[in-house]
Amino acid sequence: MRYFSFLLIPLFLLTLTEPAQELTSAEEYSQRGIARFEKNDLDGAIADFTKVIEMNGRNQEFCYYFRGLARYRKGNSNDAIDDLTKAIAIKPDPRFLDDRGNLLAKQGQLDRAMADLNKAIEIAPQYAKAYGDRGLVRVMQGEATGAELDFKKCFELDSALEPGFKLAANKIKQH
């Protein structure tokens, strides 16, 4: 019996160290990329989304979008903007435009940010967050009246966004 248990231990260790099954499809890389992104494994997510793009997988706009968000979280705004630009070129989704607009605003490119936010609102007039974000850009530009109108529309569409946008607007005004 003792000999048998000694044989089981190395066998058990082999199963623990056996490499994970290799991914073979773009869909598998995409799914793992989302999981890694959600777990904040940003390098892993970037690698997986890059692989999907290289494999010419489906829904590439989302791969560029999530890779861009991962790059932003890692502190690389320029690459993030490039990826969001590629996502928008494939599909001008209002979320993509809104997020790129936010990144551009953080870089001080307020006119470009405003163009993205205007386009997001044009595509999806019921997308409350875009109005709030445009309101913040207007605060940055010193356009108090326009900002108030955007915030009013945002809060009419989604009152849950009100505390966050009011706090952000106050922080911008303090600077």
Image (cartoon, grey):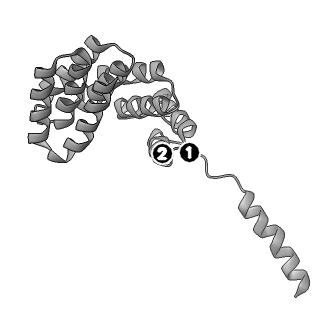
In this rendered view, identify the residue nearer to me: 6 or 167: 167
Label 2 close to label 1 by CB (< 8 Å): yes
Label disc, if present, on residue 23 of the rendered structure? 1
User: Residue at the location (44% across, 42% down)?
Assistant: 27
In this rendered view, identify the residue nearer to me: 18 or 160: 160
Name the residue tied to disc 2: 28
Q: Quadrant of residue 56?
A: top left
Q: Identify the mark nearer the N-term, 2 or 1.
A: 1
Q: Left or right: where does residue 73 sit relative to residue 19?
A: left
Outermost residue, front side: 174
Q: Residues within 10 Å of mark 2 (few under 14, many from 20)?
A: few
Q: Position of residue 147 (x, y in %)?
A: 15, 24
Q: Position of residue 145 (x, y in %)?
A: 10, 21
In this rendered view, identify the residue nearer to me: 66 or 135: 135
Q: Position of residue 83 (x, y in %)?
A: 41, 23
User: Residue at the location (36% across, 14% down)?
Assistant: 108
Spatial distance from mark 2 to mark 1, Cα to Cα?
Answer: 6 Å
Question: Relative to residue 75, is residue 108 depicted above or below?
Answer: above
Q: Position of residue 28 (x, y in %)?
A: 48, 45
In this rendered view, identify the residue nearer to me: 173 or 120: 173
User: Residue at the location (14% across, 46% down)?
Assistant: 159
Assign a secondary structure to mark 1.
loop
Q: Quadrant of residue 62?
A: top left
Q: Left or right: where does residue 65 sit relative to residue 155?
A: right
User: Residue at the location (13% across, 40% down)?
Assistant: 155
Label disc, if present, on residue 67 of the rendered structure? none
Q: Quadrant of residue 5?
A: bottom right
Amino acid under disc 1: Leu
